[in-house]
Amino acid sequence: MNTPKNYITLGIFIAILTLYVKTLAPSVVTLFDDSLEFQLVVYQLGIAHPTGYPLYLLLGKLCTFLPVGDVAYRLNLLSALCGAATVALVYRFILTLTEQIKPYRFLKPIRFWEAGVYASHFGAMSGALGLAVSPVFWQQATLAEVYALNALFVVMILWGAAQTSEVFKTSEVYTEVYKIYILAFLVGLSLTHHRTMVLLLPALAVYLLTMFKPNRFSKPVRFAEIRVVGLSLLLGALPLLLYLYLPLRGHIGSLDGTYQNSWAGFWQQVTASNYGNTFILGNHFAQKRGLDFYGQLFQHQFGWSWLGFIGVAYLGWHKQYRALILTGLAWLTYCTFNFFYHVEDIEVFFIPPFLIWAVWLGLGITACLQFATIAIEKVIFRQDKQECQSFTLTGKSKTFALLTFYFLLLTPYSLLLYQSTQTNYLPLRERNTWRVHDYGLDMVQQPLPQNSAIVGIVGEMTLIRYFQQTENQRPDIQTIAADLEANRLATVEKLLSEGKSVYLTRELAGAAKRWSLSAVGPLIQVKPQPITTPPVMDYTLNQTLTSHITLLGYNQTKIEHHDTKIRLTLFWQAVTTIPLEVKLSARLLNTAGQVVSVVDGTPVHFAYPTTAWHAGEVVADVYDLPLADLSAGQYRPLLIGYDPANNATEVGRIQLNNYVKNWP
């Protein structure tokens, strides 16, 4: 059955990879998690956040040379490859566990071995596919993150350990000792990727110790055994040299500037000691999770999660205690750690327990199929025990009947997998869009003066730097990351004193009282003094919104990245100081006068309320109205000013003269 196993493994890998590529993030898709960081740090071969992830950075760098998509897409593709490989190896791991079980030990008269083989394949595929379409694992297989590769290491080590059961069968010759060496190397290599791999070591150590016979410890230790242990330790330690990557690339530094290229800095990075103080000994984000949270988390991944308990019982019934130790102790260790790990995205740390549960689920389905097959056999053929001893499944017709029977039994579970696929497919497609990519590209494509400075939080600056370094977009722009508002204010003050043209990525408390603000595309320009001279405009109006505010004119631009939108750049002038805060609603009307697109907000991207405007000041204000979901035709822009403090009472409106043409 080796050839069919290989074909099925390859088939699962290709099918799941196709599914993951269909939902793969097309480029950069996040601002506030580690995915964007990796997409830039891998390209520049810099230093990632603790623990450094040297293996992932080097593998990712190799993927950046693939001739598909942009750099970010290639990193996303690495996760899809690792995720699909993980699913395929979960199938092989479940199959390995079932192959170590003598068929039907509890019903010895039945010699239905072929049925056991088919049941094992169907059960193993069911468990693997259950993991493949589980929401957390699927999501992590579609964007640049470390968890898909970590899951691949978990299943490789579990599968590798399960295959070492024959190594120490005899006391004289280690016929398959190379499996121990491969396992040791994999363990060491995994430790250069994600630190949670240490949670697998207790289960692995106990499992390997159970391979020794009790009387082995009473005999003198032989040189061959010392050699195996010594060489295994050496092969396990050898991959740890990859951590030399950190001091060798330390001059590049980390994106947040916290990495110190010293022995103390190296040790702090590798051990992630700050994380322990923040998320284990402390609870920085004030996370409160009850036992019901964890139960619902597992239930959300696998609709029929109770089948995993049958899988555990199946191993116990057949006295596969070593397999129970390997999977059960690993599952308990991971879950215990996660219970005390107070991070916001705790679900991704449950991927190894999810993987193990998928293995148990596959074993549970295998047990159900085997038991049902024997029961049906006894009912249909009404064999007594003597006759059953001579019965074997032969012939194409019986094989076809058996496979049909399995398909029927698995129909409810197949429908569950289909439902899970449908449920998770669309949210992933909606989440993994070009929106963040287009936002970053929009910022660097604005007509900013040479050597301008953009100030924002770390994620936004990383996005701009990604385009600067990977696509050579406006490398002259200085990017300064400051997460705290006080730091951003101080940074803007310093840059303005140096005569820099300064732009913000978001509203900043206190800025409206100190400086004059205007919108430039998605950015906010900071000026030391108010601007009173009107700029050149595509359309001139001089129309009053309120007695205090006049619309001098506007520019209308069609933005066509991956989502088409119309950009209205409005040029307001404060006739006098404005006592009333006015918010604006920018709308598109169809030919019937119906509102089909609307954007509301405080002027200048929520950063510059009208009460802060100076008399005579000209303020540029930008609103983007999406066109992607609108049918072909003409649409007319409408501006409505309203009082947010008085039930959004309208205070004025302006109908723009020209039409917006949309031809999808």
Image (cartoon, rainbow, N blue to C red):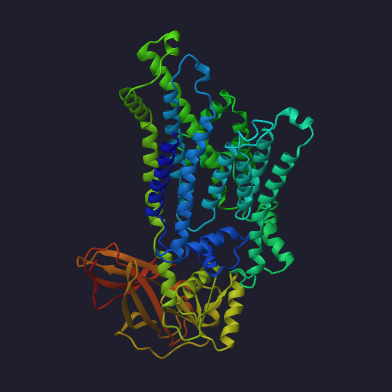
Residue 651 screen position, x and y as percent: 36, 73
Quadrant of residue 219 within the rendered picture: top right
Observer-nearest residue: 635 or 291? 291
At x 58%, y 88%, the residue is 498
Quadrant of residue 395 within the rendered picture: top left
Observer-nearest residue: 409 or 84? 84
Residue 441 screen position, x and y as percent: 42, 72
Residue 277 screen position, x and y as percent: 70, 55
Examine the rendered structure and indicate whether residue 613 appears above or below residue 381.
below
At x 57%, y 80%, the residue is 492
Quadrant (top left/top right/bottom left/bottom right) for the N terminus = top left
Residue 334 screen position, x and y as percent: 62, 43
At x 63%, y 33%, the residue is 325
Quadrant (top left/top right/bottom left/bottom right) for the C terminus = bottom left
At x 40%, y 10%, the residue is 383
Please identify the residue farthest to the front as the structure is shown. 173
Observer-nearest residue: 516 or 153? 153
Q: Is residue 525 left or right of residue 327?
A: left
